[in-house]
Image: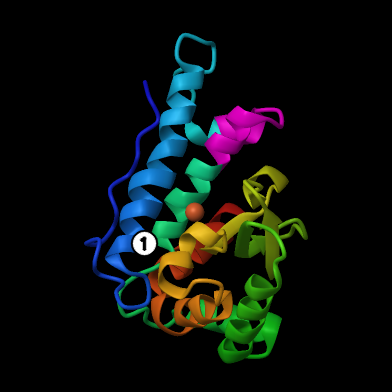
Amino acid sequence: MTIQLPDLPYAPDALSPHVSERTISFHYGKHHAGYVRTVNDRIAGTPDEGRSLEDLVCSLPAGGLFNAAAQTWNHNFYWQSMSPGGGEPDSDLAAALAASFDSVDTFRAEFAAGAVGNFASGWGWLVFDGSGGNGGGSLRIIQTDDAQTPVTDGLTPLLVIDVWEHAYYLDYQNARAAYVDAFVEHLINWEFASANYAAALRAHA
Ligand SMILES: [Fe+2]
């Protein structure tokens, strides 16, 4: 079994002008596909061949194979975190965002500020932290560097933005804030985030 590059959930030009078809052609077709290829090249003929991507990410030691596997997982999640037209969170997620951040608009501002302020080539996440137990849990905005991913810390991602330069440089050059603003205003796939939140609540009930 090999690790697959998932199909994009929309046409390559569907996020334009916020993320152009040219950016996606490189980001998905070169960077993401390259991570997948690296994983498959390195696990071929080893005991890791046949393991799921999630299993690899959560058990590999730090190093090149972990980086390629985690970058594959993160990019799989990133493409799903966007949709043409965005939408709004469902009532349950909207209420949870309001409880954690005062309002959905305040969440957007804090999520954007975190992503813009991430000094690394990395990722900005909305996660569900169910470590409180008893069916409780909270929503948090966190940043990770390089290929790091919250799934290795037992956190449940709801949404992610890629802030590696390859995600925005062709469209925005050094203006990361303009890319992040476009993401939070126009591209967040709230249906995906809401479904992830509902699944997280079920898993921690
Ligand atoms: Fe990327």
- Residue 57: percent from the left, percent from the top? 59, 35
Residue 61 visible (yes or no): yes
Q: Quadrant of the C terminus?
A: bottom right
* Quadrant hosting residue 11: bottom left
Q: Which is more toward the observer, 175 or 51? A: 175
Indicate whether residue 57 is drawn in magenta: yes
Coordinates of residue 15 in the picture (x, y in percent): 31, 71
Instruction: Report the side of 205 relative to 27 (left or right).
Output: right
Write the start and end of the magenta stretch as one range.
Answer: 56-70
Crowding near the residue tagged with mark 1, few <14, some 14–19, many ≥20 C-alpha atoms within 10 Å: some
Q: Nearer the viewer, residue 32 or 186?
A: 32
Q: Is mark 1 within 8 Å of ligand 1?
A: no
| Image coloring type | rainbow
Magenta span has 154?
no
Residue at left offset 55%, top offset 77%: 175
Can residue 168 be seen from the camera position used here? no
Residue at the spot of label 1:
23
Quadrant (top left, top right, bottom left, bottom right) of the N terminus: top left
Judge by depth and name the residue closer to the eye, 175 or 136.
175
Vertical placement of residue 105 versus 121, above or below: below
Seen at 56% across and 58% down, the residue is 164
Q: Is residue 176 left or right of residue 185?
A: right
Using the image, determine if residue 112 lies above or below residue 125: below
Kindly give the residue lying farthest to the right in the view shown.
132
Residue at the top extreme?
45
Where is residue 143? Give x, y as percent. 69, 62
- What type is the residue that disc 1 sits on? Thr
Q: Mark 1 falls on what kind of element?
A: helix
Tell me which corner region of the image, top left, top right, bottom left or bottom right, holds residue 102: bottom right
Q: Quadrant of residue 104?
A: bottom right
